[in-house]
Amino acid sequence: MDKSETLGPEAQLRDWRKAERKRLIEQRMTLRAEERAALTERIADRLEELIGDPAGLVISAYWPFRGEPDLKPLLARLRERGAVTALPVVVQKAHPLEFRAWQSGDKLDRGVWNIPIPAEGRVVIPDVAIAPVVGFDRQCYRLGYGGGFFDRTMASLGGKPRLYGVGYADQEIATIHPQAYDVPMLAVCTERETVMPV
């Protein structure tokens, strides 16, 4: 009898997700910088189309980490068109994220995993929240890093932000085996297509 047969369903799912994260991140890290930049441009174009007129909207993205699409240039364009841009901040383990206003040139501190975070930006609530995916499925469920921050935050905001995921097409998997706490996105933008739940 192998180990997976002795584990309960929750432990099996946890182990499966951990293995999928490792595989998908390793795959993403093989992209060359110039290839990643070209794919990101196409992803950003799809996002801009989904967002529409950004004037007056608070739009949160993220600081890229471990080969994720770099949306900082998109945030700059959206800000030029009237958006307030923001980045998420881990305030405390097992708590919702906080969103702080940020634009290029603002002072940054080092946060969890040494990811830059706004040092002084005011706390805002996003109208649009863009999150990177480690993996995703056709129902727009997101496989993240496993800390639960994103789902916890979206639950605490009562469904206010429009939620969009971003990732590369090769990060699609058949299912993430969503649980009751998993929050689906309205769409996931890849370089090939905008995926929306059927």
Image (cartoon, grey):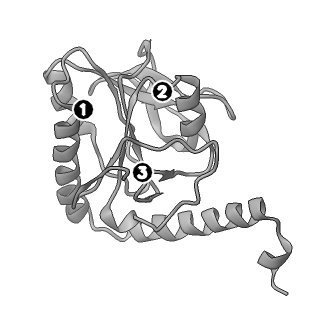
SS assignment at label 2: loop
Q: How many marks?
A: 3
Q: Is residue 144 left or right of residue 198?
A: right
Q: CA distance from mark 2 to mark 3?
A: 15 Å
Q: Residue at x 51, y 63 (%)?
A: 175
Residue drawn at x 29%, y 24% is 103
Comparing marks 1 and 2, which lies closer to the viewer? 2
Which residue is at 57% across, 30% downward?
155
Going from N to C along the chain, the mark reached first, 2 or 3, is 3
The N terminus: image quadrant: bottom right
The reply to whether residue 127 is visible in this rendering is yes
Residue kind at label 1, given as amino acid type? Leu
Q: Position of residue 179 (x, y in %)?
A: 63, 50
Q: Is residue 103 above or below residue 168?
A: above
Element under disc 3: loop
Of callouts 1 and 2, the N-terminal one: 1
Tag 1 near tag 3, CB within 8 Å? no
Q: Which residue is mark 1?
A: 75
* Separation of marks 1 and 3 at Cα, in angstroms: 23 Å
State the residue position of label 3: 140
Q: Are marks 2 and 3 in contact (CB under 8 Å)?
A: no
x and y percentages locating residue 110 in the rendered image: 50, 34
Tag 3: residue type? Cys
Other residues around mark 2 within 10 Å, as few (<14) / some (14–19) / many (≥20): few
Relative to 165, 152 lies left or right: right
Residue type pointed to by label 2? Gly
Q: Which residue is mark 2?
A: 159
Quarter of the figure with residue 78: top left
* Residue 134 locus on image (x, y percent): 46, 57
